[in-house]
Image (cartoon, rainbow, N blue to C red):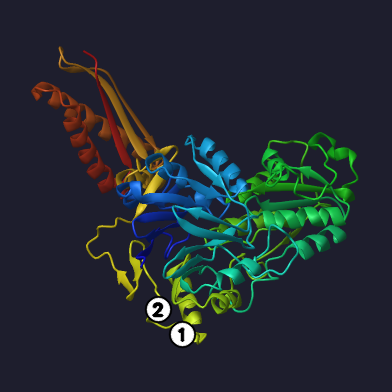
């Protein structure tokens, strides 16, 4: 009989950074390899991925990477992981296109071993039968999967909502799920992001009625801002433009790239609509024109703010009082402040502003009834809520317990990153990783560097943003044992004293610097620069803190000229 281990190296009790591992006997299958965005506590960081030391230690056993989602924060860690732990990558063609573009952008491109799948399909990976089924999520061709074992199927739900529509690329494939359910499900891993929401997600996720009403009532042009990683809403936008016979102008190249995206058969996906070049927008009747801007994350708000303040690059586009600005993005817990500020700036332009809120627009993740449907269909022996904060996972577990389908505290598992759910013929148990052999944590990605940013660097960056910097420089001669150029002392970002007081502080810091350098030159034998710069840093730090109560970064630089 097979022995199964399931765990998360990242993604539990956090927003993003998903990295999940299924081990069956000696084979490892990895699915999702995402990152999370930095906060104010991690300045200068592009994103944060999970520590993948466990994969490096067991890279010979990795049989496949599976990418069920098309968003870069769901696959963006894999280019970095793949270089050290190569294995075949199974995904849809669209995911491959987006993945390779992301890897090129961050200079991580290499010979990735992609194996494209279609939906639905059943294929064999390392002797195991995998069945892939489409789900309805914010990106097309998102999927879940099952893997067959001698104990039953292991099923991963993917991001999903119950959506009854004829749209080929945004449909939950209940037919394939029904066939999977014909075999007992030993373990179900299901998302928890919206598990605390009552009812079904649908139709609260739709924007088509919102767009249609806005386009009908707008007296002049419409500006529409959308997240570029939500093609469900972008598809609704194009359908609304087609139905209302609107002409579309793309605000920039990013927006145009979304329209030109081809993700099946090389065909254009969106309805054919009349496209107006940016240079021709003044020749079009205002009532007939819609201008689309797209961007990911908080960058969309930056783009809108520049437009509202007339600081955007394209001088042909200016907002006037006859325009309607439609903001089709609901703020998250992390960016509510910047979203509110951006909306305020739009109002100052005098245009009509329409926007959605968290209450009016649902994230496309399973609500309570969506999850109940999946649980009722598959009836898993063991249930493992994943993805989301602990409060969401706990709500998911409580909901499953209350359903009365045989799930209880004995077979519902709420785990932390690094803890393993172990299943064999004798039942299920948890390896709590009390010995710490499975390393979990954050790896900072700064530019193209992986793990180069340590806590000391983060601390320095935080101090720079809060308290500023003092830079001191000079050149010294070994033979003459004296300072031959400088010193130059620069203070930036922290000195808010009156002019006379500031001048006195600069003179005092310069004097300390000269005295310490000269004393060092008269006594040193090995000319160890690290020793003297460390002493200067400590001395000036204490002095400035005693005067101002601030703690700027001190950077003394010393060049030995001969």
Q: Are marks 2 and 1 in contact (CB under 8 Å)?
A: yes
Q: Is residue 396 above or below residue 282?
A: below
| Along the line of sight, the residue nearer the viewer: 112 or 443 | 112
First in sequence: mark 2 vs mark 1: 1
| Along the line of sight, the residue nearer the viewer: 461 or 427 | 427
SS category of the residue bearing label 2: loop
Q: Quadrant of the C terminus?
A: top left
- Visible residue check, residue 479: yes
**Residue 385 image position (x, y, % from top left):** 46, 71
| Along the line of sight, the residue nearer the viewer: 527 or 261 | 261
Is residue 274 shown left or right of residue 493?
A: right
**Residue 56 image position (x, y, % from top left):** 33, 47
SS category of the residue bearing label 1: loop
Q: Quadrant of the N terminus?
A: bottom left
Mark 2 neighbour density, 10 Å: few (under 14) some (14–19) many (20 or more): some
Is residue 166 shown left or right of residue 425?
A: right
């Amino acid at each position: 009989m097979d022995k199964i281990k399931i765990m998360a190296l990242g993604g539990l009790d956090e927003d993003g950074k998903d990295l999940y591992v299924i081990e069956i006997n000696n084979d490892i299958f990895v699915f999702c390899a995402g990152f999370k965005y930095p906060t104010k506590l991690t300045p200068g960081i592009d994103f944060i991925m999970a520590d993948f030391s466990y994969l490096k230690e067991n890279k010979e056993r990795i049989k496949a990477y599976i990418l069920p989602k098309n968003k870069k924060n769901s696959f963006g860690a894999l280019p970095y992981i793949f270089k050290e732990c190569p294995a075949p990558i199974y995904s849809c063609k669209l995911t491959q296109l987006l993945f390779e573009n992301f890897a090129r952008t961050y200079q991580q491109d290499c010979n990735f071993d992609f194996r494209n799948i279609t939906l639905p399909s059943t294929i064999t990976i390392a002797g195991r039968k995998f069945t892939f089924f489409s789900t309805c999520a914010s990106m097309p061709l998102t999927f879940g999967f099952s893997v067959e074992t001698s104990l039953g199927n292991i099923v991963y739900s993917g991001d999903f909502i119950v959506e009854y529509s004829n749209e080929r690329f945004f449909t939950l494939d209940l037919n394939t799920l029904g066939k999977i359910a014909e075999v007992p499900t030993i373990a179900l891993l299901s998302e928890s992001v919206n598990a605390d929401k009552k009812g079904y997600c649908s139709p609260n996720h739709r924007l088509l009625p919102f767009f249609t009403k806005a386009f009908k009532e707008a007296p002049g042009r419409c500006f529409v801002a959308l997240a570029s990683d939500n093609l469900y809403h972008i598809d609704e936008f194009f359908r609304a433009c087609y139905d209302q016979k609107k002409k579309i102008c793309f605000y920039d190249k990013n927006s145009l790239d979304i329209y030109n995206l081809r993700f099946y058969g090389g065909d254009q996906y969106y309805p054919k609509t009349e496209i107006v070049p940016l240079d021709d927008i003044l020749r079009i009747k205002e009532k007939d024109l819609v201008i689309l801007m797209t961007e990911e994350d908080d960058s969309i708000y930056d783009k809108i703010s520049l437009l509202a303040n007339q600081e955007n690059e394209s001088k042909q586009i200016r907002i006037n009082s006859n325009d309607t600005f439609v903001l089709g993005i609901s703020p998250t817990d992390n960016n509510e402040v910047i979203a509110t500020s951006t909306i305020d700036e739009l109002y100052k332009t005098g245009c009509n502003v329409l926007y959605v809120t968290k209450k009016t627009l649902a994230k496309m993740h399973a609500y309570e009834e969506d999850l109940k449907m999946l649980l009722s269909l598959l009836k898993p022996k063991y249930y493992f809520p994943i993805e989301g904060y602990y409060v969401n996972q706990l709500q998911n577990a409580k909901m499953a317990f209350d359903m009365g389908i045989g799930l209880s505290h004995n077979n519902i598992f709420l785990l932390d990153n690094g803890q393993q759910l172990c299943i064999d013929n004798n039942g299920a148990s948890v390896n709590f990783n009390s010995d710490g052999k499975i390393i979990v944590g954050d790896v900072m990605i700064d530019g193209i560097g992986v793990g180069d940013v340590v806590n000391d660097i983060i601390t320095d960056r935080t101090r720079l943003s809060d308290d500023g910097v003092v830079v001191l420089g000079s050149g010294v001669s070994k033979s003459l044992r004296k300072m031959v150029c400088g010193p130059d002392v620069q203070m930036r970002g922290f000195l808010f004293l009156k002019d006379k007081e500031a001048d006195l502080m600069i003179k005092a810091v310069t004097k300390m610097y000269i005295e310490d350098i000269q004393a060092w030159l008269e006594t040193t034998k090995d000319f160890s620069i690290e020793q003297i710069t460390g002493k200067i840093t400590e001395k000036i730090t204490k002095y400035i803190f005693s005067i101002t109560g601030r703690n700027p970064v001190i950077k003394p630089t010393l060049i030995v000229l001969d």
